[in-house]
Image (spheres, rainbow, N blue to C red):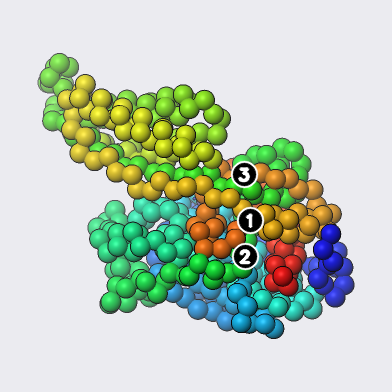
Amino acid sequence: ESQSCFPNSVSSLSVDAQSLQKQIDELSTFSDTPAPSVTRILYSENDVLARRYIKNLMGLSGLSVREDAVGNIYGRWDGYEPELTPVATGSHIDAIPYSGKYDGVVGVLGAIEAINVLRRSGFKPKRSLEVILFTSEEPTRFGISCLGSRLLAGSEALEKALKTTVDGQNISFFDAARSAGYANDQEDLSGVFLKEGSYSAFVELHIEQGPILEEEGISIGIVTAIAAPASIKVDFEGNGGHAGAVLMPNRNDAGLAAAELALAVEKHVLESGSIDTVGTVGILELHPGAINSIPSKSHLEIDTRDIDEKRRNTVIERIHQSAIIISKNRGVGLSEFKIINQDPPALSDKSIIQAMEAASRELDLSHKLMISRAYHDSLFMARISPMGMIFIPCYKGYSHKPEEHASIENIANGVKVLAVTLAKLSLN
Ligand code: HGY
Ligand code: MN
Ligand code: MN
Ligand code: MN
């Protein structure tokens, strides 16, 4: 048991639950879709308003704020040994279409409140503490997940790709970034990269996005590993034609090719032999999209993950084989089979796991070790810093839909564990 690092015991730590709930509710109003859903897409007007809201809260918490060229926002509380590598925490506030108001938000507003909790307790950080708002964790606008954290973790491939990346309306990444007040004419993002060892630790607070903690009545999840995500874009092309006049033997229906591949995704995932392998086709578009026109084009986007990277890669290979076979059997062109990302899993750092366990024990909160099947910015922070994640229960494990919910009591518990963990890591 490490001695507590507060002037008085951790039980006196106080979270301002009322303000935190109000902030969660206010932030959720910056949305392109009506409540209770939240839609907040990278560099949109609501994203810019939400960023301003967060920067204001960071200022009120006495954090000095800086932003990088793609809009990662850093709020820093200088420690009394500021030359030491700081400890960081943070998450995201972008939200996929028609989702909820807690995914990511709990780890940004909760992190700022954790700073307030520490200040109110009289704690003085030795290592500076930094709250990071990652610019875009969701892949919605440009199809790239964890764009901000992937970049700051040093992805040169992403820096290069962004020069030619456009969104669904053909707006370039840089034009979109400039419209939100970021990027610059040079279009040079190398200043976003953080060096390995920039932080002595990174910890993210997040809703579980799964049912285990709520089902088992456990307050805190301590993440030991984050599953390995991958996403693939596929396009089929056929001749299309009149849905009534073209006889079946003369068709090469791109829509049915897509449907067959979608079922092949499910087949290859299930034949992996492990419950930890998952996959779905979250986007399936048919062109021209008229009931009486045989689809001449189909576009699928496949999301497949596993905690075992090799097993996941085998699934990707089999999906690719199936796409080729379907294309041959149906006489449709496989005009694109593009792996967008095929990321390795990440392991949490042992000493951070211990700090989170000790914090949970000192706060008398039930806790358990678990893996994260969802990816997070922590997956990329693990490339440049020892990483850890704290989960809190969410209603029926729901996420990425308007019914997503976490009780303010559970959020406050997560904020306290984060505050005590940050304090321990800061004094290390
Ligand atoms: O999809 C994910 O795992 C993340 O929640 N965006
Ligand atoms: Mn999400
Ligand atoms: Mn998230
Ligand atoms: Mn995530």
Q: Is residue 76 above or below residue 50?
A: below
Residue 152 badge: none
What residue is pinned by disc 2? 201
What residue is pinned by disc 3? 371
Residue 295 visible here: no
Q: Is residue 292 above or below residue 224?
A: above
Separation of residues labelled 1 and 3 (CA atoms)? 13 Å
Residue 286 visible here: yes
Q: What residue type is labelled 3?
A: Ile
Q: Earlier in the sequence, mark 1 or mark 2?
A: 2
Instruction: Describe the element under mark 2 as helix, strand or loop.
Output: strand
Q: What residue type is labelled 1?
A: Asp
Q: In which quarter of the image is residue 248?
A: top left
Q: What residue type is labelled 2?
A: Ala
- Expressed as whole percent of the image width and height from the top left, the position of residue 117 reads 74, 71
Residue at x-position 33% and y-position 44%: 339
Q: Quadrant of the N terminus?
A: bottom right
Instruction: Describe the element under mark 1 as helix, strand or loop.
Output: loop
Mark 2 touches mark 3? (CB < 8 Å): no
Separation of residues labelled 2 and 3 (CA atoms)? 19 Å
In this picture, residue 377 sits left or right of residue 79: left
Q: In this view, does 107 lie above or below 278?
A: below
Instruction: Describe the element under mark 3 as helix, strand or loop.
Output: strand
Q: Residues within 10 Å of mark 1 (few under 14, many from 20)?
A: some
Q: Earlier in the sequence, mark 1 or mark 3?
A: 1
What residue is pinned by disc 1? 349
Q: Earlier in the sequence, mark 2 or mark 3?
A: 2
- Expressed as whole percent of the image width and height from the top left, the position of residue 214 reads 71, 42
Residue at x-position 13% and y-position 30%: 239
